[in-house]
Image (spheres, rainbow, N blue to C red):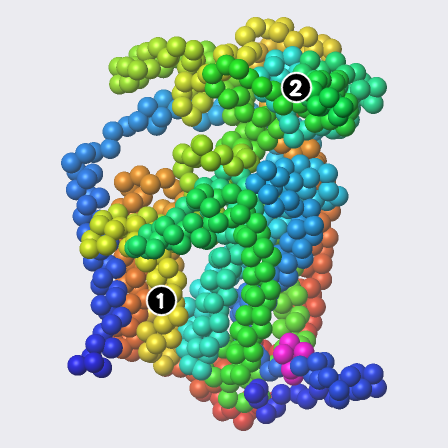
Amino acid sequence: MLPLFMRSIKFLVGLAFIGVLMIALFGSVMGLIKEPPQPTAEEEIHKHPKELHLASDGPLGKWDLAALQRGFLVYEKVCASCHSLNLVSFRNLADLGYSEPEIKKIAADWPIKQPVQDPKTGVWGERDNLPSDRFPKVYYPGTGTPPDLSLIAKARHDGAAYVYSLLTGYGEKPTAEQIKQFPEFAKPPEGMYFNPYFANLNISMPPPLTSEGQVTYSDGTRATVDQMAKDVAAFLVWTAEPTMQTRHRAGLAVVLFLLIATGLAYGAYLTVWRGVKH
Amino acid sequence: MSFPWARQYEPKNPVMQWIDSRLPLPRFVYNAVGAGYPVPRNLNYFWNFGVLAGVALVVQIVTGIVLAMHFHSSAAGAFESINVGIMRDVNAGWFLRFAHANGASMFFIVVYIHIFRGLYYGSYKAPREMVWLMGVVIFLLLMATAFMGYVLPWGQMSFWGAQVITGFFSAIPVVGEWIRVWLLGGYAPDDAALNRFFSLHYLLPFVIAGAVILHIWALHIPGSGNPTGVEVKGEQDTVPFHPYYTAKDGFGVGVFMIAFALLIFFWPDLLGHPDNYIPANPLSTPAHIVPEWYFWPFYAILRAFTADFIIPAKLWGVIAMFGSILLLFFLPWLDKSPVRSANYRPGYRIAFWVLLVDVLLLGWCGGSPATPFFIILSQVTAAYYFAHFLIIVPIISRLETPKPLPNSITEAVLGDQGGSRMSETALSA
């Protein structure tokens, strides 16, 4: 009796797992028949980001410094009032081609100051930003929590295109058919705005880029809403990984070296094995 | 150990003679990965992956030691120390970080190919059971290490992954919740959990290195297997490891490094999840919590159990998930066929390829949201996974008629898979 049990224990264990899975499968299929899955608003209305082409795209992408400077201007004049950039320091702006005096001035003029505590009295006060400071935290009193933008281009699927699509997606409305299917989307809730590129479809952020010329570009580029959205997306790709261009350049050299080394290793392999059938 | 015709270490250099007669370490290396280890001459490229896994382990230890010098293991500082300190301020810190994160993926790619190589060529069979058992131990240690490493950046997926995985233990009846709190050092992942995960994440790779030494030691008792599954019969069947397989592995390591470099330098975030660039927030649960890709098949098995049958569904899922790996320990005794290589086992060969597709489908389910389609697919594929190891393979191994085996490795090599009938004496040159 015992040897037979020992010999068939594998089948018993296997059948136990399979049996429980079949019960679960039966439950899943019955559930599916009783309550066929209804299409959700997210599936029906939510849109994938629009196509966006930036100089930093692809394995050999480079920075377009003019676009990054324009993007920084958009961030400074529009986004910065609600969104912080707390992982980036003012000194990092040197990468975008700003000179030291320019960076000092940008830091000193930044409207949100650095909090400091007086060591003698313990009272909190403020001081101007220095190039060595990070962009200061922003405390936002309204509804919603504006996320820090430092890593936003990496923290969303297809990040740069997502930022661009979100900023230019406010004009789009759900179609009559979609409203018929999901009547709650006829009008966004109080204080919310419809945006098909946002995961929840209704977003607390009011349209930030509304009219041409909202910022004035010094290089003569026309500041259309589309252009501003594109430039700030390019800028946020830089803030997410300022070392990207270095990475691409190093990668070219490394892969070239490895190709040659591997070619030589293959030659060595053939030489060693010459005359030995295998 | 080893074959009688293995070359003996005879150092010419007086310094090496002096060392070898007092501490035979050079002799040990010579016999392990030098000219003193005879290896079948017919190994194909799938036999490169053991060495590649060793290379991946070294890469992870070296990059990890340097990263640890710059990492702050605190819930308040971990995310910044990686995403500002290491990524922006440390010299080439971005390279170390991306090499370590993608190194984990490369390690698993290599290990999975190595495991499936073993499944196809019957590498787990006598007399190599112990090699296989040590391999499964290494695989378990590797999974534990990778999981704890993924928690360290303290992003959203780190935090919620830790929450979900430690939640497995709360499925244990009566004492489960108590064990979970004890493991985490708190009611939710926080400083205590992060610090102990960091400590263990630094420790376990060295435990893995020790297990790897046992794995190779056990391998060197019978010697390496080969694609025919026929044991070595004589000197003409083998070549010395050095220079033959050191040269071949050199080429293999080159190809591995090219793939690795392409990931690090051009697609460093391809295998990661965007949510881990969001700092951990205990108050905001991500829409879809998914582990890293290398855990997807097991995550799918966990989620496939949706029915409370005698015990709660969650406990079934946890038992099945751990069981799906632990049953690999019994594989040498589940597959009783004396023929090793699937090349000569028509029935098993079909089962092998179906299993491979099944595991890929499980992976697809595990990485996708838990919609009815993926739940149903994972229930079918999880059932097949257990059926393969516990029912199909034991039955096939009893019923199958294997194809005729070549008389020797040399015959298979010279006569293209056993077609020729040349005598062995004519070949031994």
Give the number of the mark in front: 2 or 1: 1
Query: On the rendered structure, is A70 left or right of B186?
Result: right
Query: On the rendered structure, is A212 left or right of B418?
Result: right
* Separation (CA) of disc 2 from disc 1: 56 Å
Residue at point 68% right, 89% down?
B8
Magenta span of residues: B29-36
Q: Which residue is mark 1?
A: B327
> Which quadrant holds the N terminus of chain A?
bottom left
The amino acid beneath tag 1 is Leu
The amino acid beneath tag 2 is Gly
Residue at point 57% right, 40% down?
B75
Query: Residue A71, which numbered label?
Result: 2
Magenta-span inclusion, residue B263: no
- Foreground pick, A32 / A274: A32
Chain letter of mark 1 equals B
Classify residue B122 by image quadrant.
bottom left
**SS at badge 1:** helix
